[in-house]
Image (tube, helix red, strand yellow):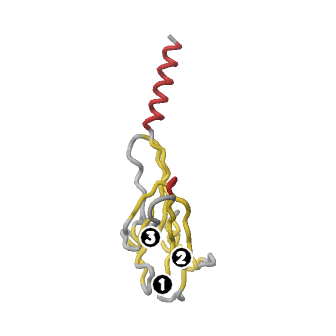
Amino acid sequence: MKQKVFLIAVVLLMVGRLFANQELQLVTLSADGTETTYTLSNVQKIVFENNTMTVVMKSGSDATGITCISFSDYVGIENPKTVTSISVFPNPVQTFLTVAGADKNTKINLYDINGRLLKSIPAKDDSTEINVSSLTPGLYLLQVGEQVIKFIKQ
């Protein structure tokens, strides 16, 4: 009887592993708000060059014009968990930068390219506007919760 129970348990375990999804994903957000999901095993590298971010794929076309990258993973047969996407626009920006998708009171930190904290504010309900008109033109980093997004001030 114990052998029968053990054999059934092993079969059920193997069937569960056969049907389980286990994928790491790369989620990109472009300047126009388009979100694209890639299986991380298909990504060769992520390149930051000349104020642009590019995802180089092992095969197929590369992803360019990216403003935000996040990673997600899920295990199981059910649908993957929802990834909260933070949108930052316009990018490049001149006066007001809008941050959308952050939960209320999430800390938004603005850093220069050398990592100096320039401004820290809590996110508002739906979207938060940040006045960046006093910044000198260049590349900046915005930390919204766990995500770091680069943007260009013109």
Place of residue 15 in the rendered image (x, y in percent of width and height, measured from the top left):
45, 30
Q: Identify residue for label 2.
A: 110
- At a point 51% along the width and 75% down the height, the residue shown is 52
Using the rendered view, name the quadrant where residue 19 is placed.
Answer: top left
Q: Identity of the amino acid at label 2?
A: Leu
Q: Name the mark nearer the viewer: 3 or 2.
A: 2
Q: Is residue 1 visible?
A: yes
Q: Identity of the amino acid at label 1?
A: Val
Residue 81's tag is none
Q: Decide which of 26, 127 is in the foreground and name it.
A: 26
- 99 lies above or below 6: below
Q: Identify residue for label 3.
A: 123
Task: Describe the element under mark 1 as helix, strand or loop.
Answer: loop
Q: Identify residue for label 1.
A: 132
- At a point 45% along the width and 35% down the height, the residue shown is 18
Q: Earlier in the sequence, mark 3 or mark 2?
A: 2
Place of residue 59 in the rendered image (x, y in percent of width and height, measured from the top left):
48, 59
